[in-house]
Image (cartoon, helix red, strand yellow):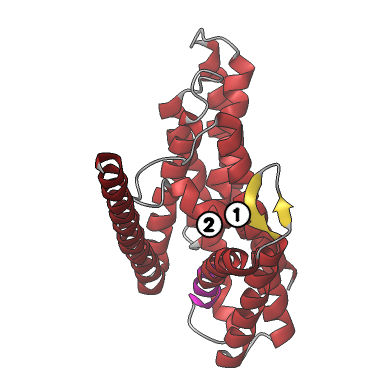
């Protein structure tokens, strides 16, 4: 009887842990969504500050995952990331002009020069890791400010595009997960993310398109076709962003990029879809 009692207690303990994790994840998720929406709606400046924090925390998590394989100058990398982000964000806010874009090369030059004096192994691997963090993380976060700036052309509040951007990213992520859970059969990319399925991707994509149609209904412009392509860009490239972050974690054999968001992992885990969707949407809005 003793082993059976032990098994029963273990089962109850396991269920309790799962329930606690669910409520922890739910609470963190609600706070994350609330803070993001509040910062976006309040003003482009508060949104820019939020995106800056997201960029630097994600960059810090990214660089730390390399452990012994590369040894980038962490402080200089994050400081340089802050400078690159700030220049782009201030241009998007209309505070600086496009003539300031040339100054983006300064922090890049300092990364190369600083490595001369560090006397670390694999200097070009260290430099390359830092430069990748600029391209993969800092610039996509900075481009969110330009997406915000384009919002006035959507026939609604200035935050129309950036707000709809995050809502569609969240809808795609949540509904892809639920659809895959209920109907997933065929693996989308088994080598990188065994749990993702084509059915899940289809569910996320269709609900994203429905959200795009909904925004077209509520705002006078642009045309519904533009909103549908906008939603499709987000759904497709957010999925790629998710897969790329899964590839990163699989490469370094880590479950989460960090632990700053209890129940969700790190900032990089929450913003992974944004990282590829942001440049894609930025290019699309430039075209239209």
Which residue is at a point 58% across and 84% down the rendered structure image?
215
Residue 102 seen in this snapshot: no
Which residue is at a point 39% across and 70% down the rendered structure image?
37
Q: Is residue 107 left or right of residue 124?
A: left
In the image, residue 205 sits, relative to residue 114, either above or below, namely: below
* Residue 245 picture location, percent across and down: 58, 44
Please tell me whether the stretch drawn in magenta is mainly helix, strand or loop. Answer: helix
Residues 209 and 16: in front is 16
Residue 150 seen in this snapshot: yes
The residue at the far front in this view is 1
Q: Do the residues bearing badges 2 and 1 touch, measured as CB atoms within 8 Å?
A: yes
In the image, residue 209 sits, relative to residue 132, either above or below, namely: below
- In the figure, residue 116 lies in which quadrant? top right
- Residue under numbered circle 2: 91
* Residue 226 picture location, percent across and down: 71, 79
Which residue is at a point 43% across and 35% down the rendered structure image?
79
- Residue under numbered circle 1: 98
* Residue 91 picture location, percent across and down: 53, 57
The residue at the far top in this view is 119
Q: Is residue 134 left or right of residue 53?
A: right
User: Of label 2 and label 1, which has the lower sequence position?
Assistant: 2
- In the figure, residue 252 lies in which quadrant? top right
* Residue 75 picture location, percent across and down: 40, 28
Residues 103 and 132: in front is 132
Instruction: Give the class, few, some or many, for how many residues have Cα within 10 Å of label 2's Cα (few <14, many ≥20).
Output: some
Q: What residue span does the magenta drawing correspond to? A: 159-166
Q: Is residue 221 left or right of residue 56?
A: right
């Amino acid at each position: 009887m003793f082993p059976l009692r032990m098994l029963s207690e273990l089962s109850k303990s396991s269920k309790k842990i799962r329930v606690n994790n669910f409520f922890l994840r739910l609470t963190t998720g609600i706070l994350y969504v609330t803070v993001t929406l509040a910062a976006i709606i309040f003003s482009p400046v508060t949104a820019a500050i939020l995106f800056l924090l997201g960029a630097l925390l994600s960059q810090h998590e990214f660089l730390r995952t390399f452990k012994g394989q590369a040894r980038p100058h962490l402080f200089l990398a994050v400081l340089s990331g802050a400078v690159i982000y700030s220049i782009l964000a201030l241009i998007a806010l209309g505070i600086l002009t496009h003539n300031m874009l040339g100054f983006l090369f300064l922090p890049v030059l300092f990364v190369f020069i600083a490595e001369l004096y560090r006397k670390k192994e694999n200097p070009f691997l260290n430099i390359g890791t830092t430069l990748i963090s600029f391209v993969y993380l800092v610039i996509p976060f900075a481009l969110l400010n330009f997406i915000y700036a384009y919002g006035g052309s959507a026939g609604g509040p200035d935050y129309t595009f950036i707000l709809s951007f995050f809502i569609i990213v969240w809808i795609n992520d949540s509904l892809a997960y639920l659809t895959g859970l209920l109907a997933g059969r065929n693996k989308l990319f088994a080598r990188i993310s065994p749990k993702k399925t084509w059915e899940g991707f289809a569910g996320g994509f269709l609900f994203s398109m429905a959200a795009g149609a909904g925004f077209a209904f509520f705002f006078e412009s642009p045309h519904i076709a533009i909103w549908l392509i906008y939603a499709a860009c987000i759904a497709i490239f957010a999925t790629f962003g998710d897969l790329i972050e899964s590839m990163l974690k699989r490469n370094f054999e880590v479950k989460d990029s960090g632990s700053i968001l209890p129940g969700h992992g790190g900032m990089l885990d929450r913003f992974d879809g944004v990282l590829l969707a942001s440049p894609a949407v930025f290019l699309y809005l430039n075209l239209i």
